Image (spheres, grey):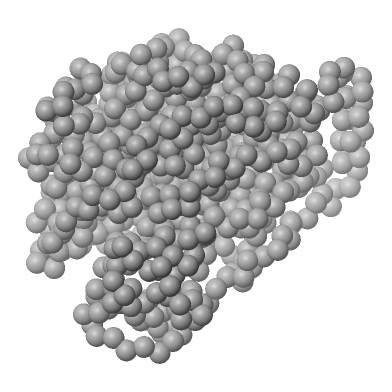
Amino acid sequence: MYKSSPLIISVAIVLVSVSCKSGPEPGTAEHINAVTLQVNDARLLTSDEKPGDWISYGRNYQEDRFSPLSQITKSNIEKLGLVWSINLGTTRGIEATPLVVDGIMYITGPWSIVYAIDARKGEIIWIYDPQVPREYGERACCDVVNRGVALYKGLIYVGSLDGRLIAIDASSGTKKWEVVTVDQNKGYTITGAPRIVDGKIIIGNGGAEYGVRGYVTAYDALTGKKIWRFFTVPGNPSHGFESKAMEEAAKTWTGEWWKFGGGGTAWDAMAYDPELKLLYIGTGNGSPWNREIRSPGGGDNLYLSSIVALNPDDGELVWYYQTTPGDSWDYTATQHIILADLEIKGKIRKVLMQAPKNGFFYVIDRTNGDFISAMPFVYTNWAKEIDQTTGIPIETQFSRYKDINSIIAPHPIGGHNWHPMAYNKSTGLVYIPAQESSNMYGQPQDWEYVDDARTWNTGTRYNPDNPDQHDSLATQWNGKLIAWNPVTQKEVWSVNQKSFWNAGILSTEELVFQGAGEGDFVVYDARNGEKLWEFPLQTGIVAPPITYLIDGIQYVTLVAGWGGGMATWVKYTDQINPGGVYTFAIGGEKDAPQFPHQILPKLVNLKFSATNEQLDHGSRLLERYCSKCHSSGPGGAIPGLIYSKPETFEIFNQIVGEGAFLGKGMPKFNDRLSEQDIQDIKFYLLSSAQNEKNKK
Ligand code: CA
């Protein structure tokens, strides 16, 4: 272990702080006020000039997550070590990108809770809990997560799970204002980070599986006054259209889509080009997924699964590019958008890059939305290719599953999901946290739309009357870190990962930082993917790391913990850490923290007797009501139900029907499920546990 460096670091900190800093004591309210008030439009526009801070979600408006800081390199990476860690004491999802200004850090945890941290000391300064009502947990498709805050002129902004946008005083943690951005009777949630553009705060929402209509809204950042709203899909035409864009979009829909909300929720990606004055937003899937139900006469269904470029002054549509016309597979284009200037065929092009769920990597001209190129970065069989002239996908004959049960790749989880990529200006590569996957889609025999903010409506299910399509290549499930050349549209290197679901990326000139779902924080060589360093955190990792300077020294921080309701595979099978914040520097010598561990549960083994009909009924109910939150494995934010304790099954009806675990976010279902229904779910779980045991 390297011993002398921490001393050097502390001496250096003392020297720097004594000799250079005449301002207020770091970490005091006066200091926080001073440094957070400096984050204004000019600072946001020039964030690359002060890479020692990380003041917006993607580090800069291009959202490239590439830091020019160069103290941590290939040659000293073996001396990278843990400096401090904070136990957040939660096993619910952690997905936040921290923001840092002069060593003052802001992160979010589950239930949209905001933490201010003194990164010099590794201590919490304040906690702001927006008190999200726990029944909202049921409306979150993918756990009660939050991906981070925005920072502007002394205020911290969080979008809360229940649809509020809240401005908090950066130094005291007290609320300044809040606005409700959604109809809280509907299935909207906010999990994404807000962005600041030209004095406005922009926020989207999620909920396309719960029958909502997507939109983004801009508010005055200082007062919370609403400035504009851009809907991503048209509403009922008989009510009139909000804009020309909606009138045009409605021509691409058929049937009575507005009864299902339509979807198109913009729940994550945004980027901004200040020279072009264009705000780029990624939009989500259709509601329900199956176009045959949503828009039975076909149609592209604009602006689902699209990148829309808006004028940030008034929210008017300037151009759009639709990655998945007539989406029927949950192929959102809400995935990370990165802006870069690339030399393509001898010309510098201002491009926008995205690896949406549909498995193709897109390079688009960001000045006008012109298609440049798209190639598959994982195995895809919904489309053979994207026509390289028109930018329109050429679908396979089994991609639409009206008369056939189709195994389609990628799975709704996507070839790439929310986990941020990074674009390294030095290697010219984009690092994609990807996964190979597939899913069975079918036209359901007896599907019925349930108009309820809590009900998962996808409209696809295996149909036993229809023939099956078999694709042996689509059955591989594999997590993969891919280094992609966006100019040649080719993979340069890749690393196969044990865990299917891995973390977001940070890149510096020589290095790629990524948490592996199996519980290790890993650093790779940016040029060839060689693993250079790893550190066991003993918890699932999905959030992207960041890097910054404090008093001239480079640090890396990662917020780690289960995320997104996904069953992440941790190699420490009997003990895992709860969520935490971890900060590293050269010479750090702390061991992996041993927070009080969560013991992973075992398969239940109880006697029961049930008919095949009861088991089938239980299986359908489990799929509809339980599986969107509970993973299938023993780990994850919410473990698989077959791993529940025998005592849990004894009071199963009290928990599921009457809400005994309401305080933990487990809803009560007695308004929707009878005691008989609940018993059939229980029988199905006990039978599944036995089957799982027999496999082992
Ligand atoms: Ca979705």
Residue 186 position within the rendered picture, expressed as x and y whole percent measured from the top left: 32, 43
Residue 420 position within the rendered picture, expressed as x and y whole percent measured from the top left: 49, 38
* Label total for image: 0
Q: Is residue 611 above or below residue 631?
A: below
Please tell me in which quadrant of the rendered image residue 607 appears: bottom left
Q: Is residue 339 above or below residue 626?
A: above
Residue 372 visible within the image: no
Task: Give the side of residue 401 with respect to residue 24, left or right.
Answer: left
For the C terminus, the image quarter is bottom left
Task: Give the side of residue 420 with respect to residue 375, left or right.
Answer: right
Task: Give the side of residue 281 with respect to residue 64, left or right.
Answer: left
Q: Please give the name of the residue rendered at 36% of the width and 77% of the height, measured from the top-left corner.
A: 682
Q: Is residue 653 above or below residue 229?
A: below
In the image shown, does 616 or 352 lie closer to the viewer?
A: 616
Residue 42 visible within the image: yes
Residue 469 position within the rendered picture, expressed as x and y whole percent measured from the top left: 17, 60
Q: Please give the name of the residue rendered at 48% of the width and 52% of the height, measured from the top-left corner.
A: 134
Q: Please give the name of the residue rendered at 19% of the width and 48% of the height, measured from the top-left corner.
A: 290
Residue 496 position within the rendered picture, expressed as x and y whole percent measured from the top left: 49, 54
Task: Give the side of residue 675 with respect to residue 400, left or right.
Answer: right
Q: Is residue 510 above or below residue 468?
A: above
Q: Please give the name of the residue rendered at 49% of the width and 81% of the height, measured from the top-left corner.
A: 646
In the image shown, does 676 or 482 lie closer to the viewer?
A: 676
